């Protein structure tokens, strides 16, 4: 899902940002989501998640997180720190915690979803390069992809308590089976469901199911189709899987078979399907019938001062 970057200073972090008027789209409950949500200049977004009422967008510039009320448009910035990075991000409903992938910093952070306070940091030292890319939360663990290695990074969780585990509990899970590393970004986006993990390998475009206990990987049969530039993944109802292809400016809509043994493309969300301009979407968050895509704008001139925003699309399932 993510692209390793050198640290870039964040400019105009607290520049006022506005939410454009909501479109005529509304679900049966009268909810009219915004088509475009402005982010601060120089934000350098990558990951996005939701608790159902708010969106959370992380910054690669210094690890700041922006909390955005979907209905109200209210925004609250959780300040970052020099050298900190926020890449993939997932909301833990049970603990009301944000789990944040730390990129080249070789860490996962647990942050309070209301205040942004860093509650605990889990480090994964390695003599080799790491890029902690995306993260997903299950009842028993947090799993993160490392786009530089053939392993997952794991923070075990208790199903009986909301208490965060001690930092020393963090561990790695070696991956075996079909996955083979290639040049560039390997495992990227990751989601969990039905007792398995699903991840996309960006450089080859292949999808894999992963046994969360053994680490065994098996390529998901996709009828010869691949998803190069595969970035964020999002699960929808009835076995729907959304695969973001960042530089292709599209989202593939797939139907996953039982236990993720196979998948087929059932739709494509392209440029004309987004409610506002799209520019290299990296990840998406599903809220009701809307997909909110964060525009990472990889390759933009002067990223430290560039415009960034979130774009809505109707979810196709």
Image: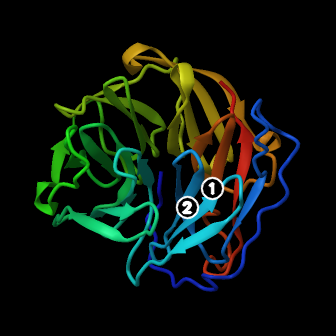
What residue is shown at x 58% (from left), y 70% (from top)? 76
Q: Residues within 10 Å of mark 2 (few under 14, many from 20)?
A: many
Where residue 196 sits: x, y (%)? Answer: 32, 27
Which callout, 2 or 1, points at the residue further toward the start of the chain? 2
Residue 60, image x and y in percent? 49, 70
Q: Residue furthest top?
A: 258
Q: Residue 57 — which label? A: 2
Would residue 114 appear left or right of 69 to someone viewing this image?
A: left
Describe residue 207's horizontal placement relative to residue 310 as left or right. left
Where 48 sits versus 112, above or below? above
Q: Which mark is residue 74?
A: none
Q: Which residue appears at 44% of the width and 17% of the height?
A: 262
Query: Outermost residue toward the right?
Result: 24
Task: Give above or below for 135 relative to 27.
Answer: below
In the depicted structure, whether residue 215 falls above or below residue 123: above
Question: Number of callouts in the render?
Answer: 2
Residue sitting nearer the eye, 52 or 23: 52
Check the image and tell me how it is coloured.
rainbow
- List x then y, in percent, for residue 103: 37, 64
**Label 2 residue SS:** strand
Residue 36 visible in image: yes
Q: Are marks 2 and 1 in contact (CB under 8 Å)?
A: yes
Locate residue 16, reporting x and y percent. Answer: 72, 79
Please state which of residues 270 and 235 is positioned toward the viewer in this rendering. 235
* Mark 2 vs mark 1, CA separation in Å: 8 Å
Disc 1 element: strand
Q: Nearer the viewer, residue 94 or 273?
A: 94
Residue at image mark 1 = 294
Q: Quadrant of the C terminus?
A: top right
């Amino acid at each position: 899902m993510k692209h390793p970057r050198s640290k870039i200073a964040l400019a105009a972090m607290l520049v006022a940002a506005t939410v454009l008027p909501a479109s005529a789209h509304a679900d049966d409950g009268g909810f009219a989501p915004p088509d475009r949500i402005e982010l601060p200049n120089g934000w350098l977004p990558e990951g996005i998640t939701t608790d159902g009422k708010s969106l959370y967008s992380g910054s690669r510039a210094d690890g700041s997180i922006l909390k955005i009320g979907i209905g109200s448009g209210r925004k609250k910035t959780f300040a970052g720190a020099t050298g900190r990075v926020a890449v993939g991000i997932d909301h833990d409903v049970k603990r009301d915690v944000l789990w944040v992938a730390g990129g080249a910093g070789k860490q996962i952070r647990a942050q309070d979803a209301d205040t942004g306070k860093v509650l605990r940091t889990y480090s994964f030292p390695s003599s080799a390069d790491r890029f902690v890319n995306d993260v997903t939360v299950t009842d028993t663990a947090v799993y993160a992809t490392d786009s530089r290695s053939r392993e997952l990074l794991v923070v075990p969780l208790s199903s009986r308590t909301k208490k965060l585990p001690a930092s020393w509990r963090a561990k790695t899970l070696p991956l075996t089976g079909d996955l083979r590393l290639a040049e560039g970004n390997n495992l990227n986006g990751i989601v969990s469901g039905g007792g398995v993990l699903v991840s996309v390998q960006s450089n080859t475009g292949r999808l894999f199911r992963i046994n969360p206990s053994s680490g065994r990987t098996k390529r998901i049969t996709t009828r010869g189709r691949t998803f190069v530039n595969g970035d964020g993944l999002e699960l929808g109802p009835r076995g729907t899987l959304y695969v973001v292809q960042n530089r292709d400016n599209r989202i593939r809509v797939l139907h996953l078979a039982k236990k993720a043994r196979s998948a087929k493309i059932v739709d494509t969300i392209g440029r004309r399907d987004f409610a506002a301009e799209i520019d290299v979407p990296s990840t998406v968050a599903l809220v009701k019938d809307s997909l909110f895509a964060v525009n990472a704008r990889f390759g933009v001139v002067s990223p430290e001062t560039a415009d960034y925003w979130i774009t809505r699309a109707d979810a196709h399932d």
